[in-house]
Amino acid sequence: MKIAVVVPVFNEQENLRELYRRLRGVFEKLQDITWQVVYVNDGSNDSSIEIMLEQCREDPRFSVIDLSRNFGHQAAISAGLAHASADAVILMDADLQDPPQIIPELVEHWRQGAEVVRAERRTRKEKGLRRLGFETFHRVFTWISDFPIPSQSGIFGLLDIKAVQELNRLPEKNRYLPGLRSWVGFRQEVIYYDREDRAAGEPKQTLRRLIRYALDAIFSFSYKPLRLMTGIGACISIGGFVLACVFVVKRLWGIETAQTGFTTLITMILFLGGVQLVAIGLVGEYMARIYDEVKQRPLYIVSKLYGIEPPNRSGSAPSSCSAPRKNQSGTAASA
Ligand code: UDP
Ligand code: MG
């Protein structure tokens, strides 16, 4: 049995050595398992790549997919999923917020037949605006998603190769992996853990990125915003129609209609204008995502592979951890 651990990395020089030590420690206890770590270097500009290559030279079970620039967390994971060749893949962040000591539990559930094992946060340590953002998103998302997606789990977890292959077949560009993982189905199980704060360094997912990620999640898994706008539009139209009827009848019966003032008029115009702009904005959000799909750009571009082969060449000898390889672009669909 072979397990690949996919770790997206963006400027994690402070955490990589500790991660290396802890991953090796955990797998030492799982004697009957062959394992591989696939780092995906997502355009780091600190010394992360040097540290990863150092580890790759020291232990050939560590390999690196070096992307040509920073493509974002979800694209980096997709690159890792497309290249990992194993019976199961574990996805985890590099900042030790996803504790490696949970791995044996994930593997145990998989051995007992689970095909997707999600690690769900019982508690989390983030504070302030970030925590408020996470909590609001999870509440809104649970309500809004058209498809039941557990809101307390991120990417951390294990995927059987069957689930990985199905995820690799999904061609969509705006990816929300926790949602897609629920969507692919199979036998899913959950384990619980307490989420620590990141071990060192600042969060690499900026607030702006997290908002974009949350919007991707909502617009990929829900038509409710559109339906909500249709509902609001319908209510306003019915209200307007009833008012118009009242005014016409009053006029016909010769009842003096009260003169509506400037304030009422301007309030109504501004309110309706606002609602219309929000509605157009919402349609635009969906349209921009359709445009992303139509453009068919790859999710990421691989600059070099170290200690790992391209997805369609599995079985051949892995490339060296020091020799650069020639460019190769990839999409989740091509894997
Ligand atoms: N990451 C990445 N590309 C990015 C941003 C982050 O590969 O553009 C990696 C990062 O190195 C870490 C993981 O994704 O391993 C999660 O990032 P972070 O801890 O900043 O996110 P959070 O825990 O706040 O969701
Ligand atoms: Mg983190």
Image (cartoon, rainbow, N blue to C red):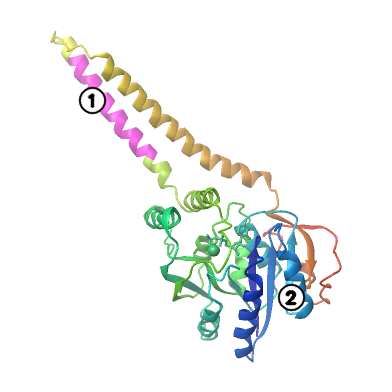
Q: Quadrant location of the C terminus?
A: bottom right
In the rendered image, is residue 145 in sight? no
Q: Are marks 2 and 1 in contact (CB under 8 Å)?
A: no
- Which of the 4 image quadrants contains residue 15? bottom right
Tell which of 230 and 192 is nearer to you.
192
Cβ of disc 1 within 8 Å of ligand 1?
no
Judge the density around disc 2: few (<14), some (14-19), many (≥20) Cα neighbours within 10 Å. Answer: some
Residue tagged 1: 242
Residue 55 is marked as 2
Secondary structure at badge 2 equals helix
Side of 249 where 234 appears, left or right: right
- Which of the 4 image quadrants contains residue 72? bottom right
- Which of the 4 image quadrants contains residue 201? bottom right
Secondary structure at badge 1 equals helix
At 50% across and 61% down in the image, what residue appears?
A: 179
Q: Name the amino acid, label 2.
A: Gln
Side of 262 where 216 appears, left or right: right
Residue 93 position, x and y percent, is 58, 67
Q: State how far apart marks 2 and 1 are (Cα).
A: 72 Å
Q: Magenta segment range? A: 229-249
Residue 248 position, x and y percent, is 21, 14
Side of 75 where 258 appears, left or right: left
Q: Name the amino acid, label 1.
A: Val
Q: Is residue 126 above or below residue 3?
A: above
Tell which of 141 and 227 is nearer to you.
141
At 43% across and 67% down in the image, what residue appears?
A: 124
Residue 134 on the magenta span: no
Judge the density around disc 1: few (<14), some (14-19), many (≥20) Cα neighbours within 10 Å. Answer: few
Q: Is residue 104 above or below residue 177?
A: below
Cβ of disc 2 within 8 Å of ligand 1?
no
